[in-house]
Image (cartoon, rainbow, N blue to C red):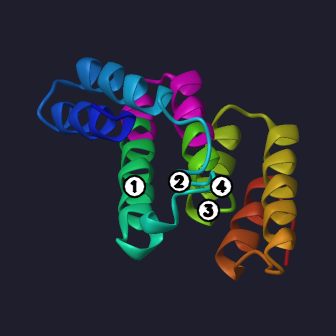
Amino acid sequence: MTDLSVFIALAARARDAASNEAIELLSDALTLVHGEPFDDGGYEWADATQDNVQTHDHILNAARDLYRLACEADDLATARFALVQGLKAVPGHEDLYRLRMQLEHRAANTAAIHATFNELTHQLNVLECEPSTETVNLYRQLVGRRT
């Protein structure tokens, strides 16, 4: 059994579980994430078969679901864990960075909002991209800067 099959099974069980159990199952699934899927050499087939894209989707969905459930339970540490694990798999994913900035705003941690935005801009610079207008506007709103 592969880590991916275990991940998918845990996430599937979480969909039918009560919130507390779902948080535990999704946390267990995301613990299996150690970096970008299929990033090592020898996994070229993963791009050709779309396994890479599907795996990213599984991880992003689990991260978003765990974030939502943890926020509903006022468990900000678990919500943060969900986003950090999602970003390990999909660095530079703006939606997760926006959620992370919102989480840090909820925690009244302005320094972490700045750090999160700076981390995103660094990730996007590597890709020769800039943050979207939506992300920049959210950042400015959260730190109280006008456009």
The answer to whether residue 129 is left or right of residue 53 is: right
The answer to whether residue 91 is left or right of residue 122 is: left
Label annotation for residue 111: none
Q: Amino acid at mark 3?
A: His
Could you say whether the residue bearing mark 2 is in a helix, strand or loop? loop
- Rendering coords of residue 7 (x, y %): 33, 36
Q: Which-is-in-front pick, marks 3 and 4?
A: 3
Residue found 27% across the figure and 41% down from its top:
8
Query: Mark 4 — residue?
Result: 97
Residue found 79% across the figure and 75% down from its top:
127
Query: Mark 2 — residue?
Result: 38
Q: Earlier in the sequence, mark 1 or mark 3?
A: 1
Q: Residues within 10 Å of mark 3 (few under 14, many from 20)?
A: some
* Marks 2 and 4, how far apart at CA: 22 Å
Label annotation for residue 55: 1
- Rendering coords of residue 105 (x, y %): 69, 42
Q: Which-is-in-front pick, marks 2 and 4?
A: 2
Q: Which-is-in-front pick, marks 3 and 2?
A: 2
Residue found 56% across the figure and 62% down from its top:
95
* Marks 3 and 4, how far apart at CA: 6 Å
Q: Residues within 10 Å of mark 4 (few under 14, many from 20)?
A: many
Q: Residues within 10 Å of mark 2 (few under 14, many from 20)?
A: some
Chain part drawn in magenta: 67-84
The answer to whether residue 118 is left or right of residue 25 is: right
Task: Evaluate if marks 3 and 4 touch, with contact meaning CB atoms under 8 Å apart.
Answer: yes
Q: Looking at the rendering, which quadrant does residue 88 occupy?
A: top right
